Amino acid sequence: MNKTEKREGIISVIKYEGPNNVFAWKHPIEDFNTGTQLIVHESQEAVFFKDGKALDLFGSGRYTLETQNIPLMRDTLRIPSNAETMFHAEVYYVNLTTQMGIKWGTDSKVRLFDPASGLHVEIGACGSFNLRVTNSRKLLVKIVGTTEGFRQGEVLEGDGFTTGKFKSLIMNKVKSNLARIIKEQNINILEVDENLDTLSDAMKISINETLDDYGMVMPEFFITTIMTPDDDPNYRRLKQQFADKTLKVREEQVRQAEAEAAQRRKVVEAQTEAQLKMVGAQGEAEARRIKAQAEADAYKMQAFAEAAEMQAKGYTYQQETARQVGLEAMQNGITGNGTGGGGGLGDLAGLGVTLGAMGGVMNMTREAMNPIMDTSSQVGAGFGAVVSGQVKEAWDCPNCGAKGISSKFCPDCGGPKPDINSGWTCPNCGAKGINSKFCPDCGSPKPEAIIGWTCPDCGTSNITSKFCPECGHKKEEE
């Protein structure tokens, strides 16, 4: 009262003078007059009551009570306009701030049935919540009434004669919904602490549905603890069942993981073994290829070296062969086992070589050797050109390039006669019987195989034109 200013026994300033932990506070002075100052702080509302009815409502600010800003009061009291008149009314201040940390707890156990184990257990719960006024008129009419106000302590606590205003509401909602929500959400009571947020949100929604009728809301509702009956035999059995189940599941998971690891290990081992075999096979094939290539290169180098040596000495491979044959004939006797010169000439003719080299070896005179040379040349020419009455086709050596060869081996490098019926034919120079990837005469690469048609008359294959290039047969229309 010491803060209230008066003018001639009537209060001239109306402001909040109550404590902070309240939701509604009634001003102790009820006689005012027009012209009185009304002060409403932030997060407050002031409501005028007359005869139990809520009339004019004022938000934060400073007001001078006049007939134009209190129309409901003026109409009720019939206050004349522009007149300073005393009137009687009740003024309530409503606190709109959120009241934090209001403690709650169940006053008895909540019976819970666990469908997994078929056991009944009893649990308790406690926590806190926050509360805020959303409608001042509803709060004053339905909660405050004719009392001096509404404190935070009256939400759950009674005055010795009555219980807290919202205790029954909150306890009923918690007890009736806690077990139901645990069952609906399929929450294991032994793991309930992991789901406190879910339980708290569901409980808040259920409580706010009723609080709205009283002009209040619960912004947050917290379940901080679920009290489990550790001394209850049923609860101990439930814990043991859960532990056994968890252990079995864990063991099965371990066995499954081991089996999967073993299977993966077998797959990796099989893949590794297959890769090693493939690498080994590739290595052996590569080694054989390298060895064959090295042997071919060595043979070719040796042949080229011998041909170069012979060329440096001034004679060919054919002449060297004839020389060696002549020497061998001289060592064995020109006549062999025969009794006349005819046998010796026949042996020489049978060798298929000329006696030019032999003449040099034997140091014979040209006059003594002329008859023999003429005969031998004719015999050798006949041997080199005609065999069994058939004329041999001359060929060119693909290794050293010697041309017009009629024997089966090159007289310069010793290379074998290529088989013209096998291999491929160079499209640039016409060389036949090529088995390498490049033509030995012109160096052209081997052409890719051409898929064409085969002539039914002469057997020529890979024909891409409309007529056979060998016999002229026309391709049949498909």
Image: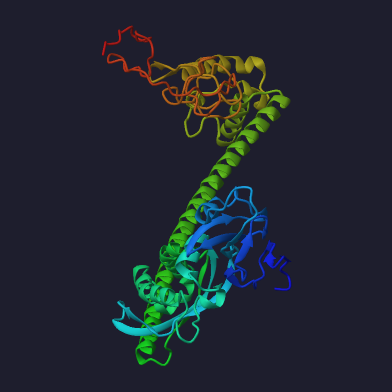
Quadrant into which the C terminus falls: top left
Residue at (37, 72) in percent of width and height: 177
Number of callouts:
0
Q: Position of residue 181 (x, y in %)?
A: 37, 70
Residue in the picture at 31% in, 84% down: 119
Q: Eyeballing the image, is 242 above or below 356?
A: below
**Is residue 464 shown left or right of residue 303?**
left
Answer with left or right where residue 109 lies relative to residue 81: left
* Quadrant placement of the N terminus: bottom right
**Foreground of the two, 229 or 476:** 229
Using the rendered image of the protein, determine whether residue 225 is visible from the camera's viewpoint: no
- Taking 465 as reference, is 316 left or right? right
Identify which residue, 236 or 63, lies in the foreground.
63
Whether residue 108 is visible, yes or no, is: yes
Residue 420 drawn at (x, y percent): 44, 22
**Residue 249: x %, y % from top left:** 38, 75
Viewer-nearest residue: 35 or 58:
35
Q: Give x and y (percent) for residue 442.
A: 59, 18
Q: Check the image and tell me how it is coloured.
A: rainbow
Q: Is residue 171 placed above or below 384 in the rendered structure?
A: below
Q: Quadrant of residue 332?
A: top right
Residue under the image location 54 percent in, 68 percent down: 131
Give 134 or 470, whichever is nearer the viewer: 134
- The quadrant holding residue 372 is top right
